[in-house]
Amino acid sequence: MIEPQDILKARDVGEIKFVVITDYSNDMNRVLSRFGLLGDSNLLVEHDRETALAILIELLWKDMAYESPCMQESEAKKMAQEIISKYEFSDSKYFSNGNWAKRESWNPLTESTFDAGIIITGLNHTYFCIWFQDED
């Protein structure tokens, strides 16, 4: 099982938020704020599971500013698969602020130079967030 400390050891650049909350408000703006992100759900893009996994692999594998590898790609794939599997449910939806796997434009949700991550919604009003922030 992947723990936040495992990610920090393997990817020792930038900042990483790793948060699980329960929120009954059905208000994604509030959920984003609780994650310490800009509370504007209009900046989120919904993705399918495959794309969410690809985004997370890329964010684990390379730093955002210079695309320098932080770990082996195979290690990033394994971590990403474990993280998604642990925090998803059969009805989960996956969100990000763009598509970092394709290095397309993104909508900043922090004051960092670069930020991206994955938010997973699920049963019982559970929300998971893993968010990466890097500076240039």
Image: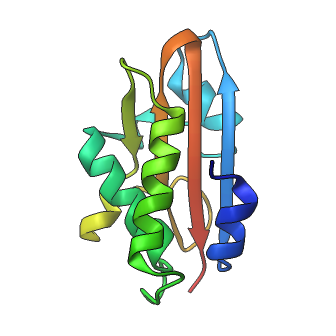
Q: Nearer the viewer, residue 47 or 44?
A: 47
> Residue placed at 62% from the left, 46% from the top?
37
The single residue placed furthest to the front in the displayed view is 1
In the rendered image, which quarter is residue 14 located in?
Answer: bottom right
- Above or below residue 3? Residue 135 is below
Direction from residue 9 to residue 64 in the image, left or right: left
Can residue 103 be seen here? The reply is yes
Residue 81: percent from left, percent from top? 42, 51
> Residue placed at 60% from the left, 67% from the top?
133
- Above or below residue 95? Residue 17 is below
> Residue placed at 46% from the left, 30% from the top?
88
> Residue placed at 29% from the left, 40% from the top?
49
In the rendered image, which quarter is residue 67 located in?
Answer: bottom left
In the rendered image, which quarter is residue 72 located in?
Answer: bottom left
Residue 25: percent from left, percent from top? 61, 11
Image quadrant containing the C terminus: bottom right
Residue 118: percent from left, percent from top? 46, 47
- Above or below residue 114? Residue 27 is above
